[in-house]
């Protein structure tokens, strides 16, 4: 089927099998490889993107179902050549080891702050619980989210 995906502020016309997931369309057709294919079952959060500003798991979302909606990936998070405050905080707090889960963690963390769930470490942990990190960088991730939340409120 022919569809138009609006990704990171740009429209992309694609011919896709109706069963194509958003994750596969992003990675294989648009060469946006920041969103990772982890479990491919919606359990790890490595594929988290924003759909109209809300976090979704791209591996469980059909590309055809997002026509007419705005998709933001990790590649589209930064603006005007500068890092998003969450990206900067992850670097400053060394909130990653292998880095595989980091794009999904950052996308989920931005949504966590925007949803108003970053007021305490416990709330951050709860609302980030759908994003798994095999390297166990959780304390640094929480610190980065807490730091970025303050920066995002000032911006």
Image: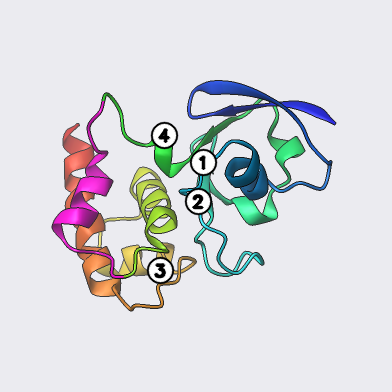
- The spot of residue 2 in percent (x, y) is 81, 26
**Residue interval drawn in magenta:** 81-97
Report which residue position mark 4 lands on. 76
Report which residue position mark 3 lands on. 126
Look at discs 1 and 2 and give the one toward the viewer.
1
Report which residue position mark 1 lands on. 32
- The spot of residue 145 in percent (x, y) is 26, 56
Closer to the chain start, of discs 4 and 2, is 2
**Which structural element holds mark 1?**
loop
Report which residue position mark 2 lands on. 35
Mark 4 → mark 1, Cα distance in angstroms: 10 Å
- The spot of residue 25 in percent (x, y) is 66, 42
- The spot of residue 21 in percent (x, y) is 71, 48
Closer to the chain start, of discs 3 and 1, is 1
Mark 1 → mark 2, Cα distance in angstroms: 7 Å
Closer to the chain start, of discs 3 and 4, is 4
Please identify the quarter of the rendering in which residue 66 is found: top right
Mark 2 → mark 3, Cα distance in angstroms: 22 Å
- Residue drawn at (76%, 46%), measured in percent from left and top? 20
Question: Residue 123 versus residue 14: which sits nearer the camera?
Answer: 14
* Vertical placement of residue 44 versus 119, above or below: below
- Residue drawn at (84%, 41%), measured in percent from left and top? 18
């Amino acid at each position: 089927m022919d569809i138009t995906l609006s990704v990171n502020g740009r429209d992309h016309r694609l011919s896709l099998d109706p069963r194509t997931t958003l994750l596969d369309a992003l990675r294989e057709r648009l060469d946006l490889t920041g969103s990772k294919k982890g479990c491919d079952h919606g359990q790890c959060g490595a594929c988290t993107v924003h759909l109209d500003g809300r976090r979704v798991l791209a591996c469980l979302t059909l590309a055809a179902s997002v026509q007419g909606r705005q998709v933001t990936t990790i590649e589209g998070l930064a603006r005007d050549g500068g890092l998003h405050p969450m990206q900067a905080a992850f670097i400053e707090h060394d909130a990653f080891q292998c880095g595989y889960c980091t794009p999904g963690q950052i996308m989920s963390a931005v949504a966590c702050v925007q949803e108003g769930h970053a007021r305490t470490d416990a709330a951050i942990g709860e609302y980030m619980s759908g994003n798994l990190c095999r390297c166990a960088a959780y304390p640094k991730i929480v610190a980065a989210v807490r730091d970025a939340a303050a920066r995002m409120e000032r911006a």
